[in-house]
Amino acid sequence: MTDELIQLGKLVSLGLALMLPLANPLTSMTLLLSLGQQIPFRERQRQVTQAAFYVVGIMLVTYYAGALLMHTFGISIPGLRIAGGLIVVTIGFSMLFPSDQPRALEAEATADALERESPNIAFVPLALPGTAGPGTIAMIISGAASVDSAIEPDYARWVVAVAPVIVFSLLGVLFWVCLHWAGRIVAVIGKSGVEAIARVMGFLLVCMGVQFVINGVFELIGKYPNL
């Protein structure tokens, strides 16, 4: 039993290390601070709690239904890895070298929010695509497709079944904490600190995305050696 708990700890740690740069709560935190200024405090906190549940729900549905969606649309694992890697690289570059366009879009969304009374921003944009965006979804589907061949033979079955739920739940809790205390976090680390963390995350995403593409290309060559 002790060995299995150690396996569970390893899988959870690995899952958090892979998912945290993608499901970056800093993005949703800045969205909340910009779009939630005109929302009453209690209503904003209620929407933060809603968004945390949405994030966990999106990840769980993606993990368990991803293989079915791939089979339905005829998407191969190498194709998913390459496409997901390109998405992750794009997101990483946008975090490394932010342009004025996101700020313009953010200002437009803020103006739109001002026109409505207490807008609900829990699902869009806080949960999707703020946290559980395309890169996160691609990573989850790719990881779920690799469980049988890469993870399950070396780990207990119940560990493999429980680890994703724990990882997604912990990400949801971290998301809630960051958004619940968004104002204080920004006050402590400052906007420059937020930007610095975002750039580090962006660099990690670029590296991960490139590695996804490399893995996908090698799998494609191995599957179709005559290409």
Image (spheres, rainbow, N blue to C red):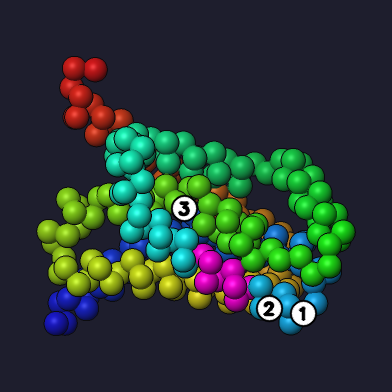
The relative height of residue 166 versus residue 21 in the rendered view (above or below) is: below
**Mark 1 vs mark 3: which is more N-terminal?**
1
Looking at the image, which residue is at 31% across and 48% down?
A: 68
Is residue 159 magenta-colored? no
Residue 146 falls left or right of residue 70:
left
In 3D space, how far apart are the residues under numbered discs 1 and 2 (Cα atoms)?
A: 6 Å
Residue 195 falls left or right of residue 1:
right
Residue 153 falls left or right of residue 132:
left
The relative height of residue 45 versus residue 150 in the rendered view (above or below) is: below
The N terminus sits in image quarter: bottom left
Which disc, if any, is residue 136? 3
- Crowding at mark 2 (Cα within 10 Å: few <14, some 14-19, many 20+): some
Looking at the image, which residue is at 42% across and 40% down?
A: 85
**Residue 67 appears at what percent x and percent y?**
30, 49
Which disc, if any, is residue 97? none
- Crowding at mark 3 (Cα within 10 Å: few <14, some 14-19, many 20+): many
Which disc, if any, is residue 45? 2
Q: Is residue 26 visible?
A: no
Residues in magenta, as a range: 48-55
Tell me the kind of residue under disc 3.
Answer: Thr
Could you say whether the residue bearing mark 2 is in a helix, strand or loop?
helix
**Residue 17 appears at what percent x and percent y?**
40, 61
User: Looking at the rendering, which quadrant does residue 91 occupy?
Assistant: top right
For the residues labelled 1 and 2, say whether their Cβ atoms are less than 8 Å apart: yes
Looking at the image, which residue is at 19% across and 17% down?
A: 226
In 3D space, how far apart are the residues under numbered discs 1 and 3 (Cα atoms)?
A: 29 Å
Residue under circle 1? Answer: 41
